[in-house]
Image (cartoon, rainbow, N blue to C red):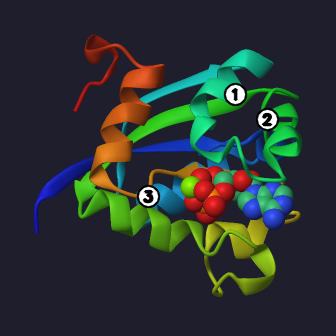
Amino acid sequence: MAIERTFSMIKPDATKRNLTGAITAKLEEAGLSVVASKRVWMSLRQAEAFYAVHKERPFFGELTEFMASGPTVVQVLEGENAVAKNREVMGATNPADAAEGTIRKEFALSIGENSVHGSDAAETAAEEMAFWFAGNEIVG
Ligand code: ATP
Ligand code: MG
């Protein structure tokens, strides 16, 4: 298996409840290394650009307003099979469907306020990392 990088966000519902450390610990326990990390309070415009793929979905307004409602921690994670590994540790989008031990099962409040984001493929990971980080901010 190849060493990969993926992009992760700790969403405002989690930063507000002081879960940045607990969520990061779960990622690290799964063998993912944090090779870039910063706290940002994104604008509505940034949230709309980041989630442009969902702009036709009925929850787009709710999602982007939520993401601009407080601080988010944006991260790059590195490790074997990092894209799939991160998705596994995150758990299903809806915490009601998430497996035991996953971040969303343990911490998410609802399908919208679900504590974390993770890239769904290597291509989106590359785009999402470039959206938030300059190359020299990622230190492996
Ligand atoms: P993410 O992209 O945040 O990692 P995901 O890939 O599991 O999550 P997507 O289908 O890409 O899920 O949806 C993006 C985000 O939009 C979800 O994480 C959630 O915050 C929000 N969302 C998805 N479905 C709904 C819904 N039915 N109602 C409200 N918000 C939703
Ligand atoms: Mg997604």
Tell me the residue that label 2 is attached to: 64
Residue 59 lies, in percent from the top left, at 83, 51
83 to 48, vertically: above or below:
below
Name the residue located 31 percent from the left edge and 37 percent from the top edge.
Answer: 126
Counting residues from the start of the chain, the first of labels 1 and 3 encountered is 1
Q: Alpha-carbon distance for marks 1 and 3?
A: 17 Å
In what element is the residue under mark 1? Answer: helix
| Quadrant of residue 105 within the rendered picture | bottom right
Q: Is residue 138 visible?
A: yes
Toward the front, the furthest residue is 56
Residue 128 lies, in percent from the top left, at 43, 34
79 to 101, vertically: above or below:
above
The quarter of the rendered structure image containing the N terminus is: bottom left
31 to 14, vertically: above or below:
below
Answer whether labels 2 and 1 touch (C-beta < 8 Å). yes
Res 18 label: none
Q: Alpha-carbon distance for marks 2 and 3?
A: 18 Å
Q: Alpha-carbon distance for marks 2 and 1?
A: 5 Å
| Quadrant of residue 77 within the rendered picture | top left
Residue 102 lies, in percent from the top left, at 61, 75
Q: Amino acid at mark 2?
A: Thr
Name the residue located 36 percent from the left edge and 43 percent from the top edge.
Answer: 125
Q: Is mark 3 within 8 Å of ligand 2?
A: yes
